[in-house]
Image (cartoon, grey):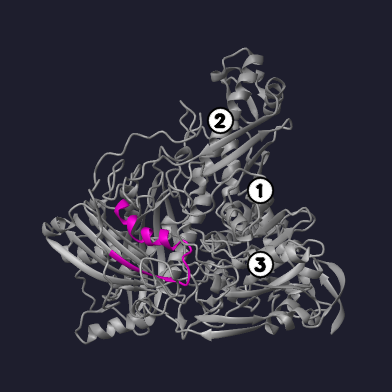
Amino acid sequence: MSPPDFSVIGRPLPRVDAWAKVTGDARYADDLVLPRMAYAKLLRSPHAHARIRGIDTARARALPGVYAVITGSDLPPVKFGILPVSQDEEALCRDKVRMVGDPVAAVAAVDEATAERACELIEVDYEPLPALMSIEQSLAHPEVRIHEYGDGPNVHKVVALQFGDVEAGFARADLVREDVFFYEGSTHLPLEQHAALAHWGPDGKLTLWTSTQTPHYVHRLLAKILDVPAAHIRVIAPAVGGGFGGKLDPFAHEIAACKLSQLTGRPVKIALTREEVFYVHRGRHPVLMWIKTGFTRQGDITACHLRTWLDGGAYGSYGVATTFYSGVINPVTYKIPVYRFEGARVFTNKPPCGPKRGHGTPQPRFALECQLDKAAEQLGLDPTEMRRRIAVEPFTKTANHLTVTTVGLVECIDRVVEASGWRRKWRGWRRDRTGEGPRRRGIGFACSAYLTGAGTAIYWNQMPHSGVVLRADRSGGVTIQCGATDIGQGSDSILAYLPAEILGIDPKDVHVQAADTSLAPVDLGSYSSRVTLMCGMAAIQAAERLKAVLAKAVAQKLEVGPGALVFRDRKVGVPGDWERAVSFSEAVELAESTYGVLAFAGSYAPPRRAGRYKGAGVGPSPCYSYTACVVELSVDEETGEVELHDVWVAHDVGRALNPLLVEGQVEGSVYMGIGEALMEAQVFRKGLHKTPSMLDYKSPTTLETPEIHTLLVETDDPEGPFGAKEAGQGPLLPVVPAIANAIYDAVGVRVDEVPIGPEKILRGLDLRRRGQPARVGPERVPAFRFREPLVVESAFGQPAEAVVARPFADPGVAGGRGA
Amino acid sequence: MKVRLSLTVNDEVHDVLVPVEKTLLEVLREDLGLTGTKHGCELGECGTCTVLVDGEPVLSCLALPVELEGRRITTVEGLARDGVLHPLQVAFVELGAAQCGYCTPGMLLTAAALLDRVVHPSRQQIREALAGNLCRCTGYTKILDAVELAARRRRAAGAECAP
């Protein structure tokens, strides 16, 4: 697919950190050790909701080996949160705990065991309060308030938006469906438990090494939380052992380690246990959904109205963004001319939910794709052909004013239909099941779209979303510094590949210094599938600036025009006269002799093209990825067990900068979708987490993960680096509904809630045998009145602006393409 | 109570003085500085801390060094020999089988034990051997591919050496 003239782009090269990772040389936060280091532990609440009447730390302080004990009163009295609108967290709770696992005190000691014993000696006087453990309970008990802020009693956030005349759209439909779905919460379960090492030096400067996806936001918030100038704080993310959204907030353990380091004058390390990671959470929101969609006989959508109720847990986290995301991305996939969306996030006394791979969009995706399947059956349409017909048009706007650029959805559909043998295997809606044994085979289909980076930062500003500094040295090596954080997705490799491609050197010649707030320009963090596009564009800009200066210097020596020069194989020269080409290191020397130190910056911010209405800031993205998925499985009618055979997934990645890395992202996304569809659930009983261990919290092993067939579709998007779009989240989305649709194809049971465990399938089969509708899922929606929506005209079908000028772009340079 | 132990790790003998209840995982990481062995749960549930004892995979978070004197312990730092990477390490690099890399040491060691036992493992045998090692990044696909590739290369190398 990739033009043959690329030397790095499109090639299946090893990751730059691959060797360190296969030899045990990669260093994660908990691998770091400093002289005189102390170990810390947190004391966490055993109550789901309680007032703190007092904390007595005297016995803990008296324990030999204890260096310091802190409670909330030892920290500045400020609340914080990742979003400026949700400042509702305390590192150590002062007056009240809102969930089992809320931290109330921290100890630093000579070793971990001593710190743990000291925690047990801390006496906390709790006055238990009623625990609200579900959306229904929280709405039914406004007299019990989890927080004192929000859009109503125990209601964190309400969104109500309407684009165009939805009722008129339903009126002209041949078929209108209303369905209710539930998507259970799940957690990220990164293999690395969060760990942090803080060193508050004698000069009053603080360094924090921490397993985070966003050193920049941690940096900003530590300054506020600790009341220390941000200029005196340095945050470094060492190798991070998986994130998936679970390491995107500032956490109590990080703050406690910093404060304890200040008080003890020692470096302090804290490492969470696996059980604590379940309490830290910030995972997938449980979401109840009602969706009403109108269709023509041919399968076109005339209007869509979606309502979502999100169980947010005890704190805000990213929840305001999640609430928007539970509605605003659906119109990016299909032609939805008019759209209404209402969402409400409700506080409960459970670990806070936040962003998990797909952030707020897998839930409505499940609802929409299962409903489309039901509508296709009623209309007698092949579900793949129906989706093909309604795929959104490239370079248009959606009803909710999002600008869509390239769309590879139709090609994705065609590729999975072909590869999976769909036309042969799908036996129509009214298939005859007589004569089949108890193991029924089924095939299912779904599609999706996802953003390539959030168009706006978490805090309002006009600065770059990603920046790099690129410096060439006389050795012929190039150093690139960028705040981007490699959590396993490969951003360090992207930072090496792109300058190497542009400068004609080997990726190994590029030294990557990333994820360090003192060393590198800001990159906002590894979330919203933004990193490859944004740090990639910044890296391209810096590399082009360096290349221009090198070309000028070499052109002078060779007495040719700079435009005639080619950078390739560590040489710079004219293709027809390659014998006279100079080595890259000589090119650097020539340029440095004339211009001095060769250091260049690159900056990227997304095009500013959000709609002009309140709430338009969540959803815009430089470009969107598209995915189509076919799942083939068997269901055992006697046990209700599902066995997955194959998953075919075609993903429009714009351009695969490295197909190995892209496939890895797709395969990992599919795997995580399988877990959410069939087994993963973060659920509670009597205020307690039911499964806070890796044995009890079921996730797919090698035995449950089927063969995954990845097909990459390239659309060469004008917004992306060399045309690339995201790959790390979108491919999760269609897997969950494709599995549900395949289960229906196999046994004729609609399970409208995930995870789909055997017991739900058996219940559906039992209903079928009794002649009742074989549908298992939520029966009703909460009694909650949404406020009147903000009504905006639909922008559906309007042409996208021609590629708009991006902030910080160099005039006359096609930023995404290289030269 | 502390005990003095002599442990053979990656063909080196180490004398350590450790509390009797300290796990092999802790001793490797904290006393011997072998931080390549990772911890994911410390309860024997995730396979991340897998090492080899006399060539067999063992969860180091559940193993007590006091029982391991005289046994041959191999960690990820001991997989490469004389500066040459193990075929599994090469295959993991080439095929992108390590993403975040945190499960990788445990995966490599479990797979190494399989390849020592089974020359021509089927994909299903590889799946079964690795079923106790969780990975959240890769969907296991590239890991299975890499183990297959390493097995093929080992067979080819073995065939070359055979008389």
Residue A322 covered by magenta stretch: yes
Q: Chain of mark 2?
A: A
Q: Secondary structure at mark 1?
A: helix
Give coordinates of residue B1: x percent, y percent: 84, 85
Give coordinates of residue A256: x percent, y percent: 66, 67
Give coordinates of residue A506: x percent, y percent: 64, 37
Q: Quadrant of residue A488 in the image?
A: bottom right
Q: Quadrant of residue A225 in the image?
A: bottom right
Give coordinates of residue A38: x percent, y percent: 77, 68
Kindly identify the residue that appears in the image at 82 percent across and 64 percent down. A36
**Which residue is under mark 1?**
A231
Q: Secondary structure at mark 3?
A: helix
**Which residue is under mark 3?**
A256
Q: Hey, which residue is sitting farthest top in the picture?
A: A559
Is A674 positioned to the left or the right of A696 in the image?
A: left
For the N terminus of chain A, the quadrant is top left
C-alpha separation, residue under disc 2 versus residue under disc 3: 43 Å
Q: Chain of mark 1?
A: A
A702 w.r.t. A548: above or below: below
Query: What number is the disc on residue A544?
Result: 2
Kindly identify the residue that appears in the image at 53 percent across and 81 percent down. A51
Within-10-Å neighbours for mark 3: few <14, some 14–19, many 20+? many
Q: Amino acid at mark 2?
A: Glu
Q: Amino acid at mark 1?
A: Ala
A110 w.r.t. A402: above or below: below
Q: Amino acid at mark 3?
A: Ala
Res A362 visible = yes
What range is drawn magenta here?
A: A307-333
Discs 2, 3 touching: Cβ within 8 Å = no
Residue B62 covered by magenta stretch: no
